[in-house]
Each structure stands twice: as C-alpha cells, then as structure tokens.
Image (spheres, grey):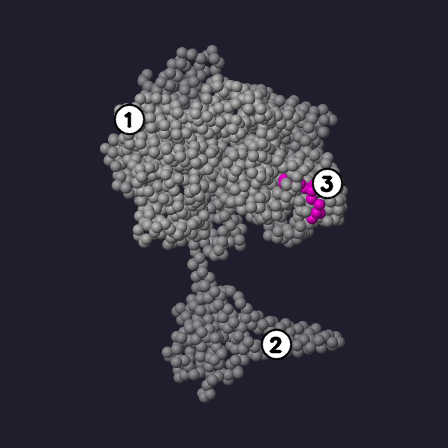
Amino acid sequence: MVQQSLNVAYSDGSSQVLWEDGERVFSRGWRLDDNGNRLAVLLVAPAADHPSRSRLDRLTHEYELKDELDGAWAARPLALMRDAGRTVLVLDDLGGKPLDRLLDGPMEVGRFLRLAIAVTSALGKLHQRGLIHKDIKPANIVVDCADGHVRLTGFGIASRLSRERQAPEPPETIAGTLAYMAPEQTGRMNRSVDARSDLYALGVTLYQMLTGVLPFTATDPMEWVHCHIARPPAPPSERLKNLPGSVSAIIMKLLAKTAEERYQTAAGAESDLRRCLAEWETRGDIDEFPPGEHDTPDRLLIPEKLYGRAAEIDTLLASFDRIVAGGRPELVLVSGYPGIGKSAVVNELHKRLVPPRGFFASGKFDQYKRDIPYATLAQAFQSLIRPLLSKTEAELRQWREALLEALEPNGRLIVDLVPELKLIIGEQPPVPELPPQDAQGRFQLVLRRFISVFARPEHPLALFLDDLQWLDAATLDLLEDLLTRPDVQNLLLIGAYRENEVDPIHPLMRKLEAMRQAGAILQDIVLAPLTCEDLGQLIADSVHSEPERITPLARLIHEKTTGNPLFAIQFISALADEALLTFDYGEARWCWDLNRIHAKGYTDNVVDLMVGKLNRLSAETRNALQKLACLGNDAGFTTLRIVYQDSAEETHGQLWEAVRAGLIFRSEDSYKFLHDRVQEAAYSLIPEELRAEVHLRIGMLLAAQTPPEKLEETIFEIVNQLNRGSHLITSIEELERVAELNFIAGRRAKASTAYASALNYLVSGAALLPGDSWKRQHDLIFELELHRAECEFLTGALAEAEQRLAVLSARAATTIERARVTCMQVDLYTTLDQASRAIAVGLDYLRHLGIDWSPHPTEDEARREYERIWSQLGSRTIESLIDLPLMSNAASLATLDVLTKLGPPAWHTDANLASLVICRAVNLSLEGGNCDGSCYAYAVLGRLAGPKFGDYQAGLLFCRLGYKLVEQRGLKRFQARIYLNFGSLVTPWTRHVREGRDLLRRAFETANQIGDLTFAAYCCSHLNTNLLAAGDPLDEVQGEAERGLAFAQKMRFGLLIDSIAGQLGLIRTLRGLTPIFGCFDDGQFDELLLESRFCRNPDLALAEGWYWVRKLQARFFAGDYASAIEASSRAQRLLWTSPSMFETAEYHFYSALSQAASCQSAAAGQWQEHVRALAAHHRQLEVWATACPNNFENRAALVGAEIARIEGRALDAEHLYEHAIHSAHTHGFVHNEALANEVAARFYTARGFKKIAHAYLQDARYAYIRWGADGKVRQLDELYPHLREEKPIAGPTSTIGAPVEQLDLATVIKASQAVSGEIVLEKLIDTLMRTAIEHAGAGRGLLILAAGDGYRIEAEVTTSNNTVTVGQRQASVTAADLPESILHYVIRTKESVLLQDAAAANPFSADKYIHQHHARSILCLPLLKQGRLAGVLYLENNLAAHVFTPDRVTVLKVLASQAAISLENSRLYDDLTDREGKIRRLVDANIIGILIADREGRILEANDAFLRIVGYDREDLVWGRLHRTGLTPPEWHELDKRAWEELNSTGRLQPFEQEYFRKDGSRVPVLIGAALFKEGGDQGLAFVLDLTERKRVEEALSQAQRLSRTGNWIYNATTKRYLYWSDESYRIWGFDPLQGLPSRQSMWERIHPEDRDRVWEAVEEAVHQKRDFMAEFRLLLPDGTIKWVEGTSYHVFSPRDTLAEVITTTVDVTERRRAQDEHEKLRQLESDFTHMNRVSMMGELAASLSHEILHPIATARNNARAGMRFLEMNPPNLDETREALACVVRDTDRAKDIVGRMRDHIKKAPLRKERFDLNSATNEVIVLAQSVIHRNGVSVQTRLADGLPPVMGDCVQLQQVLLNLIMNAAEAMGSVEEGARELLIRTDQDQAGAIVAVRDSGPGIDAQYLDRVFEAFYTTKSGGTGMGFSICRSIIHAHGGKLWAEANEPRGAVFQFTLPANNDS
C-alpha cells in the first residue's frame, strides 16, 4: 500500500537527516496544510540502499496502523510514498529527538521520573488501543517534543493481538531488538507475548536511562537470549549509591523473568512512578513501598505458567542434562488425556536449551495423515533446516560440509523428505539401488547420520514428537532404531500421547516394550488432572485475588472440567466472554455469581464448549475454519489459497477473527489450531453427511492446481483428501486419475521404506479401478498390483504376496513385465527358504524366451554355455570387453535382472545350474552390451571359472573386467559386491592373498557409506579370513575380528555374529586365551550352545561350515587328530555354501594334515581310507598351487611331504618338507612355516634323528612366537620340555622363572626403590647400573636404549679393584661392544637370553665377540613397559661361568621392569623440562606473539612481540586496556566467537586467520592458535603470528600464478576432500571460489569425456606404482570452452602404504597447444603438398611410365608363347621351355620394379632413412622423366662420379627432388626456340659429402629472383602452385643438406644440392 499524498512536497535540498538507528534514517520534510501553510513532517526511510522485503513490510505495517494511533502519544503516520526510488513513511513531526540521544550517562532522578512517567503513560495508552509494540527501546521514543509530550514510534512489528506465541527461532531472526527483548519474546520461555512484554522492554529502557548502562552485556545473539531468560540483572541501587530503593524496586519488578511477576499494566507502573515523583519533588527522598499495590488489570489474562507440574518438569530436565553430559539417547514419554498440558510441559525445555546452545525440533502427528510416511519427522527436520538458510555464507558452508560428510552418497533420501535441504547441499544424485530389506536399514542409517549432525556435544538436540497415538509405522521403527543404536549421542527424544487412546495392544505399546527389552532408556511422565488446589491457584493468579475468596469458584470449575487445564482455561474465558466473570471498577477487583454460572448450564465436554465459542464467530470465519480443520492441525498459506480460492488478503481476512480469539495461531507461512480439541470442534461443524464431499472437493482443487513438478512433494496431502471422498466419484476417468495418484503416493512411500503406508495407498488405488481395468488401464493396474505385492512381501504378508504374484505372472503382457514379476517371486521364495520354487519360477520365465533348462543340468551343459563365451569372444581379449556399448535393449536388461536374482538360489540347489545362469548372463552381455548386471556376472564368473572350469587366469581377468567397469564406467549398482568378489573370492586363487586386502577394505567402506550394512558385515568376516590365511600377527587379527564382531552385533546380524565368533574362537585359543588349547570355550564363548543353534537353524549353514573349518584347524593344532577329522567331515557337508571362499582351501589343507597324522595309528581298513582322502586333498592343492604358487605351493609341498613319508619315500619327504618351509618363508606365511617345521620335526623324530628334529622344533617354536600363537608355544613347551631349557631360542627360560621362595624380598624392594627414586636421567642411569652390577655379580654392563628406529648405548659400567665405574656414553652399538646376535634376538623377541657358560656350545657360539672377549656368563634382559621395549640391559662376567644364579636373575628381572618404568618417567620429565625451556625461550625470543588470556577475553600477559604486532605498549597491558573483543574488527566477531567457543569446549584451538585492530586504528592480519592450561580451566595460552609479509608474498605468488597460468591444490585421500585450491586453480577449472572447495566428483566432470578414462587410468597406474603423475588433457567447462592443461601430481603415502595426500599443479597450456596444432597443420600441409607434387609429376610421367611397363610385358608375352610352342613339340623341348620361362620371370620382375618405384613415389609415407647408391637412384629418375624429356626435345648427359660412397636418406624423397629439378629444367627449355636444349646431370664428392647438380640451357633466372624461387607459392608458371622448389628445399634441409640456384654459363640455370656423407660407411 504505497500512497502519494497530494499535500506532501519536498524542496530541493531542504530535507535534512536528523538521526539514524541502524535500520531507519529520519529526516525532516514539509507538507502543506489545508490553508497551504508548510508544516514539518518526519520522513522515515530504510537505511539500506536495497532493503529486505521484511524491512519494507514493517514500514507498510506501521502505516496501516495510522487509524489506531493517536498523535497525542504516537508519531502518527500520514502517508507511505515512493521518493527517488525509495519507500518513505511520512510521520507527523512535533519536534523532539529520540531518547537514545540523551543517554550519555546516569540521569538525575527527578528528570528520570518525569520522563519515565511520560513514556509509561504513552505505552499505557497504546495498550488501551489493544496493541502490543514489541520493540520498545530508546530509539523508538521521541522526547522533548514542542508540546512537552513523549511520543512512541517504530510500530513496524506491533501486534493487534492481545496475546501471540513466538516460535523458538534463531535469535538473529527474531523480530525486535535483542538488548531490550522480553524473555518470552525470544520464543524460549513457553509463554506468549502480550502487553507485559512491552513492560519488560520499558524496564530495560528505564534501567538504561537511570544508570547510563544496559542491565546486561553480551557478545552474540544467543548470549543475549541467555541473559534475558536466566541471568538476573544487578539492581540499579547497586550501581547508584544514593538511589532510593523504591525506584530500583519498580525497575526490577518490570524486569521480572516471568510476566506474572511483572507489573500487569502500564497504569500500575505509572502509578508507582508518580508516587515516587511526588515524594521526590516534595522532600528530595522516597520512602520504600511494595511495588504494584495498585496494579490490578481490568482485562482477564490467564497465566501461562504451569501449575502442579514441578516434579514432571524436573524429570524431563534431568533427562536432558544427562544427554548434554554425553549420555546415551533417551526417550521421555509424556502421557495424559487431551488438553492435560503435555506440550506445555515439554516446551519448558526451551529455557534449558539455551546455555548449551541446543536445538529443539518438533513435529505433530495428525489423525488424518497417518499414512503419510515420516510426515512428522519431516516437519521437525524442517524446523532444523530453515533457520540455517538465514546464516551467513561462511556459517552455512560449515553446515553444508557437515551435512555432506554425513549424508553422501545418500543425501537424496533426506532431500526427498525435507526439500529445503536441497538449498543447502544442492541437488543430490539418485541413491545406489539396494534390495528393499536393506533399503530400510540404509534409510534409518542415513536418518541417524542426519540427526547426528545436529545432535552433538556442542549443540545437543531435543526432538519432540506429539500425538504418538497417531504415528505411522515407519516412524515407529525409526524411534526404536535411534534408541537402540550406539552411533547417536546427545539426543533427547520426547514423545507425547493421549493415554486414553493407547491401549496395551496399540503398536506404540508393543514397540515400547520391545525397546525396553533391548536396553533402551525410557522415562515415563504421566500427567494427572490438576487438583482443586492447583486450579484454585491458577484462578487466583488470573483474577489477582486471594485463594480463599475464589475457592467456591475453583470448586465449581474443577467439578465441570475435572481438572483438565485446557478445559478449565477455556471455561474461565467463556465466563468472561459471557459477562459471568467481570471487573468491578468501584471495588477494583473481579467478581462472579455462582448461581448465574450454575443456571447457565455449561457442558461437561470441552469440544462442545469450543463449538459454542466457534458459533459466536461470523459465518465467513466458521466456514474458513471448517476447511482448515479438513486440512489437519495446520496448513500453509499456499494450500489455503488453493482451497479457499481467494487472494492472500482475503484468506487472512476470513481467518483474522479466529486469530484474534486465540483459536488459531498465524505464523510466517501457515495457520495452526490452538489445540486438537479446537480442530475437532471446527470439524464437527461440518455435517457428517457432507464431510466426504468437502474432502473430495479439496483434493480435486489441490490436484488441479499443483504444478506437475511439485506433485511428488504434495502427493500425500492430495491423496489423503481424495481418498476420504473417493466413494462419491462416478466418472471412470476421475476414478482412474485418483487411482494413479494413489499409485504415485504408494511408490513414494515405498521409496522412503514406509512399506505399511505404501501398502495402504496401493490398496486404495486398486480398489478404485473398475473390473475391466486390465483392458482399459493395463499398465496402471499392473503397477499397482506389483508394488502392492512387493509391499505385502516386505510387511510380512507373504502368503498374500505369493498369491498376487501368481496372478500377475499370468497377466503379464510383455517380457519386461514378466521379468519384474519373476524377480519378485524369486526374492519371495528365497526369503521363504524355498530355493527350488525360486528356481522353478525363474526357469519358467526363461522358457517363455525359448530357453529350456533343467533345474539340475549336466556338467556338459554348463561347460557348453561356458565355451559359448569363448566362441562369442572370438579374437577379442577379455580386457577389450570394457569398450562394449551400454546395454540398451529393455528386454535384455530385464532378463539379466532375472538371471542375477537366480544366482543365489541356484548356488544353494545345483552347482551346474549356478554355472549355467552366470555364463548365460555373461553371454547376454557379450551380445547386448554392458550394464550393472554385467559387472556382477563378470565378477561371479571370475570366482567360478577357476574351481568349476579350471581356468583361474581367465577368472581373474573377468573379475578385473567387472572391477574396471565399476571404476571407469560408473556402473556402481553392485560396487561393494564386486570389490568383495575380486578381493576375497578371486584374487587368492591367482595372486598373493594379501593383494586382495585393500579391495576388501574398500568393499567395507563402500557398503558402509551407501548404507548396505548387511554386506559391510560380510566384508568384516572376509577380512578376518584374509588375515588368518596370510598369517598376520594374531594380536592384530584379534583386534580386527573384535571390531568386525562389534559391527555385526550393532547390526544384530546373527549369521555374521556366529561366523566371526568362530574366527575369534580360533584366534583366542591359538593365543592361549582359552582355558583348554584347541577348545573355544571361555567366558565369552560356548561351543555346545553355538552348535545346538546351528542344528536348530539351517539358515546358518554358511556360518556353521566356517565354524567347523576353524574347529578343524584348532583341533589339528592341539594334536587331537581324531576330533579334527570329525570336524573335517562336518565341514565337508557344508562346503557347498562357500565354494570360492578361502575356507575351502583351509579345509583341504588341514583335513589333509589331519588324515596324514592319523595314518600311523589307524587300523588297516581306516588306513586306506585316510590315504585315499589324503590323495584327493593333495590333488586339489596341487591344482591351486599351479594357478597360484604364492599361496599354495607351501601347502601342497607339505601335504606332498606327508604322503611321501607315509609311502616310505624318505628322501622325497625331506626335500618336500624343506620346500614347504622355504616357500612359506619366502611368501611370508609365518604360520605355515611354523607348521611345516613342526610336522618335519615329527618326521625326523620318528626316524630317530633327534638333533635334527630338535632344530626343526626350535624353528617351529620361534615362528609360532612371531605369529603370536602363545597357546601353541605353551603346548610345545609342555610336549618338549627341553625346548624351554634352550634359553636363547626358546624365549622365557626356566632359569629366570625362579620360584617365589628364591626371592629375597628385601633385596627386591631395595633395588626397586633405588631405581624408582630417581627422576633425572643421568642419576637414574647411574643408580640403575650400579644396582645391576651389585646384585648380578657382573664384571661389565651396558644400558642400551631405543633411539628413533634403532638403539644406542647410553651407559657402560665396569668393576675394577672393588670400584664400580659408570660412564655415560652415547654411541652406536657395534660388534666390539657386545654379541650383536644376542642383542638382535632380545630386541625382536622381547625375551631374555642367559648363557650360563658362553664357552660351551650354544646357538650364539658363532658370534665373534664371545671368542674375542672370552666371555663366560652373559645375561641380556629386555626393559619392557606395557609390552613396549624401552631398552636392553646387557651384563657379562668374563671370569666365571654360572655367575647369574636364579635368585640374582629374578631380582634383575624385577629391576629391569622397574627400570623401564623409571626410564619412561625420566624421559617424560626430560621432555617436560625441555618443553618448558623451549616455551620460555620462545616467549623471550619474541619471534612470535604469545599471550595469556582468560575466558572473558582479558589479556593478562603478553610478550613484546605480541605488543609490537598490535602496536600497544606494556603500560596498556598493565592497565588492562587490551581485550580480545576490542582488538577484533566487527566483521570478524562471529568467527572469533566460534573459535574461542571451540577453545572453551575442547581445550584447544586450531590455528585460524583473522585481523586485529592496531592501536592506531590500522589492521594487521594474524594467525592465532591457543590452548587452555588445563581442561575446564579459566586461562589459556595463545600464539599470534603476524601474517603481513605472508599476505604480501601470497599476493605476489597469486599474481605469479596468474601470469604463469599455474594453479595448485591439495587433496586428502583419506577424507576424500580437497584441503586447498589456489585462486588460479579456480580460474583454470572454471569454479567459483565463493562456492567453496569443489568436490572430487565435480572436478572429474570438468575433464573432457574423451580424456577422462585415459587420465583415470594414468592416475591409477601412478598410485599403484607409487610414483608421480603427469599428463596433458583437456577440460570441458560448462560454457563449452575447451582448455588444454598439464597436470602434475605428487603422491604422499601413509606408513601403511595407502595413499594419504595428493599435491597437484595444473598449468594452462591452451596457447601452447594451439601453437603446436598450428605448427602441425603447417607440417601436414607441407607433407600434403609434397605428396601432391609427386602425384602430379607421376601424372606427367604417365606416358614414359606406360612405355617402360609395356615393353617388358610385351617381351614376357612373346617368351611365354615361345615356351608354349616348345612344349607342343614331340617330344617337348624342355631346355628351351625352361629358358623361355626364365625370360618371362625376368621381364615380369622388371615390370614389378617399375610399378613399385612408381608406387613408392606416389604413396604418402613417412620419412624413412636408409643407405642407398646415389648414382643408381639418379639413373632411375632419368628413366622416370623420359616422357617429359622427349616431349620438350631435350638431350640429357650424365657425369656420375665413380666410387661415390652410399648416402644416408629417404631415397624416394631425394629422387622426388631430383625429378622436380629435371622436369622444371625440361619445361623451361621447352619454351626456348633457338639453340640447343641440353641437360647435364652431375654427381660428385666433396669434403662434406655428396653434391648433385642439374644444369640446363633454358632462359635462366633473373639474379634478383634466385633466392625467391624457393619461397612458398612463388611461381613464374601460369599453372604452377609455387610449392615445388619450396618442398625440395625442405626435403634437403631435413636431410642436413643445402639446395641453391645459380646462373649457368652461357645461359640457363644450375640447381645444386649437397647431402652429408654416411658416417657409418
């Protein structure tokens, strides 16, 4: 509403700016009164040049209030107009200025009271008009007006409602001014905004007037909110000493946190202020009195505080406090009858959310929207997302990154749920396809990750879901998921439900019980009705009366309402509305008449009461409310406008009366009912028989007016309306349309995994279609029925799904439809464990395609299908199949889907059928192209080709093909499965088992990322298999297995839990962690329990098979061979479950060894059985060893050795045992090396070679130690006690392991105390070495400590003449210091070595040190702390053997343990001292700025460098003038605040850049980092680095990059995100720096599609080979621009050899490439001209060439005829015939040579240098030129030099030069009419090489043109190109020669060229 008032005018330059308040500019203008006199006006315009819509709306709103504002107390609006393109509000101007201009210090009390009374009086008059200002502050109060009055202004957000609710929006977006805002106006007090909110703002204003300061100070919006709702202000009397207490008390009452404790009216406050002024003016003092004695409001205002709910609120807040402290998620259930106050109790949480900066999200279920999946969650999530849209770009970027990190690659799922999210994270790609069962798990996972972005320690989340009695099934499942998963923290879930509508069999109750049993934390809050006393207190507070007086009234209301708060409040309001509760002005109190109330006969039902209220509204408003009620509890403006079919203004007008009555609330974009009971009452106004018609009409309007692109978003609202009236539809077309809309709704619900809701929509849609729909609407009814069957299947209605699919199968009209039905049937029967039926339906589908397969095909049939692959492949390689086109035939794609589905049940029923299925899928791909299913088929064929068809290498290539299609062609549907197949099921049969490990980890990461958690769990078990097969250290394998088990348990995936449990059982028993070696039983595992579970559940066959393989291994290691064979037979029955898995290899290997070990004790009959089985196992191992020697050579050799042993071939056995050991060692299989040594030892023991056996056992024991199989080591020690007596090899020795009674306790304590009492390293070492020498009896000792990757000697102790000398030396360890072999053994094994007599034979006898130093007793002890080696203590005695007795060794062991601890402590002490010194030197050096500050930002201490950076001196620091916030420019405040919040919450602050103000006002860029001195402490240390020089260098570097067109970036390969992009990189790649760092995907998409694969392969190869990458490639920018760039990447690898970081430089080489292309074009043009020149010459020479060719042909013909005649003679003359035929051959060879020479000259061949005879080549050219020579009458002479050496060059090109020169000369002489035409061709030799000259007697060349003849396009011939001579010169130059022209004497020209000599000749 913009008006141009006719009596408002401006004179140029006459208006003057009076003041600004940040939002508005006030200036003075003029208007003309009715008499034409000029009167002053105030002009109010937005301060911003481009004001927001909301700012302009405020000016409009203020203008619209003009009729309700009085000029006596308000600056009244006169007009709203446009001036110079700006909107201007014109106000009446009576002079004056804003109050904030007067607030430069405390105000004198008298003046304050007079102004306060005037302001309060004006505010009271505003309230009497029924308005709330909502923005009272000094800037909106005009004082010192000409008439002495005070006037209010700034009504832009004023409200006409007596009470309105403020939503808890971000404080930055709340309308109003934060410093003056009432607590309830923040939206975080569970209270409405009313006139008393203005009184709070008045209190803040008066406080500021009186004291000169605001009652609170804050640095950010949320801190202001916290101040207002929680922080008490200091009373003014504490700030001003002589201030009367009553004045202070008045202000403090105005500043009360709750509205009920404030003044209730402005008149009450004005009354008290007048009393103060009267006393002050009378006697200069004011007596104290209780404020508010005369403050009784005459309008009923029922308090919003909660009565009788303290305990319930405390329970709720306690739960929130627990989750803030980092506890698990909790669910608080608030129950009670409708209207009992459930939401009001929950909303009390808002206040508690402020200090931790928590989020509150809420949604409300609707009884009419139960089938809309996740609708309430979407509503709640919108309340989280929408506030983010108002953030700054910097803040939003952080949220965007957090959301993308959590959601990728599944962000589309949440965007579909909350479309607003797209505005933050952008369009999201479709999610990877998963089976429906897994899709639901993924959806819940993604929702958990989404919620976790908001539920964090720095901002916990409270999620409130109201009316759970109407919740949908999908949300119910999600609640359980949130509460029972460990990956969500800092989340409080609150649910409210109507107790009377939820019975014990309600789904909610059943689910809650399941949650409790699963260990979820649930709290119950049951709200009872208010007691009569509580209700009495509410009424007393409402009418401001004593409780005793209102008791009868309270009793009556309690009786009517049964204590229901909603009913009671509405009842009280009704009494006031009907004048049964009135204010008596005479007595100044509220009055009522109980008899009249009784007589009125009020209803006992709140809905009836509300109906009565609604009936008092206008008919127009009632009608509008009825439609609103049909839409649910709330509805958006857009929907309402469609339904009402009115303009926005008309819609708001129709509902205004209900808003004013408080029955509905209006928010920014929607209307909402006060309560469900009000909605029910409004809905009940519609006659029951008309309700369906209303819903149908609404649905039709919504369907008709919703744009197609928005249909999916609003489909549920549309369909819910239509379905409630669908029975009224008669038109078949409309029925079909509504059915189609139901299908869309069902499909969308199914996509959200809300299968129950989807089923309801699909059933409704199908029910609407008439009986002939299969003819009329086949596609629609088919889709409805198919999706319905799928939802029945997914919701457990399996019988119904089966029946429906059978019908659909018969109804399918196309191959594609039949395929879709078949896929679903296969899924259904597979789920029902009816694999044979799944196979039957699949085969039936194939029969329709003419493929007739048996369910049990023969081996030959499977092989024929496999061989057809090779037939189709033909000459192509497997690798080339990556270039097949994408499959486009829909029928083929559908068939491939069926084959893919058939794979799993086929594996479980018939191996040949499985082979047939996979091979057919591959053949289909070879015929029709690649697709996602092809990748899977190739990968599965990869694991099939080896075991089934013996072609392991082809299997590897096919699987790699599937992998490359995923990586390079983006066919990612089965990505994780292909990684797993490649890494675990294919690679181990052809490559070292460790090579597949990275793929397994990628499979896990991929599956986990896309939410396929079931498959991720499979990856965990396969990884464990890989680690066990490779013989990795068992402690590491155990850690990995335990992590995998925890993941499977979190998934509740029983199959994988049992699988991994078996692996873990084997690991634990091998490590000696189970009581009985070889048995898995311990506190965590029960074998019998697990085995009984396997018996009961055949679905666990896979896990059972794996379990028995692991039991087989464990029993073999334990030596229980009979039990091992039993386990083997059990495993053998289950091998079909894992044909390509490495467990099969483990089965064959350990079964073979068990059979071999059993042979010796077997009976005769059994012996043969064992041998047969052993041979079969060996054959299989031999096959694998041929395909992959790395993995299987050692296994096959060991089993072969056992067979040789049994067969008595001892020599073969010896050889094979050694071969097995060597192979296992070479390929890193330490466990197989240990095993082979152990088995070989048994072999030698049996033959009586005990010493050899002993050596093998020692090696076995050592290898088992390296493997970490401590349990096996213990078993060996028990079986072979002599092993333990050999200390050096056997580890912990019996000598050191002395019994307890040998310990001298006093000695141990003394030694320990001596060592532990030192902290300084030098003293500690001295004490340690003396103590060691003293207690050991050694003559010399060394202390060797770890240093970096090696070890060095720290100290040496010696004894001489009873004197102990400790020398501290730091030197490398050498062979001269000690026996190095002993040291290496101790370091590697962490075991002690004791040589009682080093002179005797021992494993270290070969060490030179022992011989050279004649050492006798040697002891070497490891110093271990928590298993980590800190160092080594070496002691020796060269005088005697057996010096180190058991008791001494025991003491030394204790001493060594204490020494390790003390050394570590000493090192830490040294580090601490060193760090303190470094820090002190750093501070004193003043290289960087260092300061100490407290949490408030006060800088307490700083070094000179910091003071220099900010330009302050130390006096400023001492006087406290340095404060962090004062140094920080305004635009950096937000970043600075967040940074220091991070410091306070985490204890450290990552370095970040910002600017500081210097003292002189200039700015300095700085880098800041900080840390608190202690966690939770108040002070911290910060460093500040001046970045001025760096910024200058960066700018110079940026300029240099721009000039050189070089950009760079850094990429983190672990997080898969870019860390940095330079400005030039953004320019080269065409990205906008303001949009943040690009994603890896978007960067790859910029690479030209034709170059992308090449670049990807080059990058992969570079990473694989661990080298740098360099390549040139093209970029294709969005605008179509193509750039050439040169990319160079440096790859940084982690210690684990995985790619960690990539540093890349990109150079824009577009210009360089363009120049190269131009050069190439010129070169090509020259080549073309050269070729054209030769061709044209050949044309000209055609005559002579034809003569040359015809002559030998004619001769050959004559000779052939002669030969025929000789043959016809009788007898034939064979000699003559032979001679004639020889002539024919000679002549045809001559013709062939001529043609060949001609072809060489014509064809366009590259330069080809070779040695040739120049003279011969010259003669050939003369022959070619004969026709031109004869035609022009030229005679030719040649002078060819004899003995001319061969020249190096391209003979054809050089002959072209010579031919060109001859032809030009001949043609030139042809124009000469007189004189001889002579041509002389000469060759010669000079020092440089050969020279050729062509002289003619033609007209010659003018001397000035001799050089020009070689220029391109210069010619003197009319038909010439001008390129002949130019080409000739280029050819000669390319050969390193020179071509020039001269005049010939007496006439003509001579052309000469040189050729360099052939140096090789």
Q: Tell me which residue sits at (24%, 35%) in the image.
A: 1513
Mark 1 or mark 2, earlier in chain: 1
Judged from the image, the secondary structure of the residue bearing numbered disc 3 is helix
Label placed on residue 122: none
Q: Residues within 10 Å of mark 3 (few under 14, many from 20)?
A: many
Q: Going by the image, does 59 lie left or right of 555? A: left
Residue position marked by numbered label 3 in the rendering: 805
Mark 3 or mark 2, earlier in chain: 3
Residue 731, magenta (yes or no):
yes
**Does the rendering let one see residue 1032?**
no
Q: Residues within 10 Å of mark 1 (few under 14, many from 20)?
A: some
Instruction: Tell me which secondary structure the magenta stretch mostly adopts.
Output: helix
Q: Tell me which residue sits at (62%, 22%) in the image.
A: 1086
Closer to us: 1207 or 148: 148
Q: Residue 1005 falls in which quadrant of the image? A: top right
Instruction: Give x and y (percent) for residue 122.
Output: 37, 35
- Distance from label 3 to label 2 (Cα)? 85 Å
Judged from the image, the secondary structure of the residue bearing numbered disc 1 is helix
In the displayed structure, 1361 sits above or below 176; it is: above
Q: Tell me which residue sits at (75%, 44%) in the image.
A: 771
Residue lying farthest bottom?
A: 1874
The magenta region covers: 719-733
**Does the rendering let one see residue 1723?**
yes
Closer to us: 1482 or 735: 735
Whether the residues at callouts 1 and 2 have beta carbons within 8 Å, the answer is no
Residue type at tag 3? Leu
Instruction: Give x and y (percent) for residue 1449.
Output: 44, 17
Residue position marked by numbered label 1 in the rendering: 280
Whether the residues at callouts 3 and 2 have beta carbons within 8 Å, the answer is no
Residue position marked by numbered label 2 in the rendering: 1752
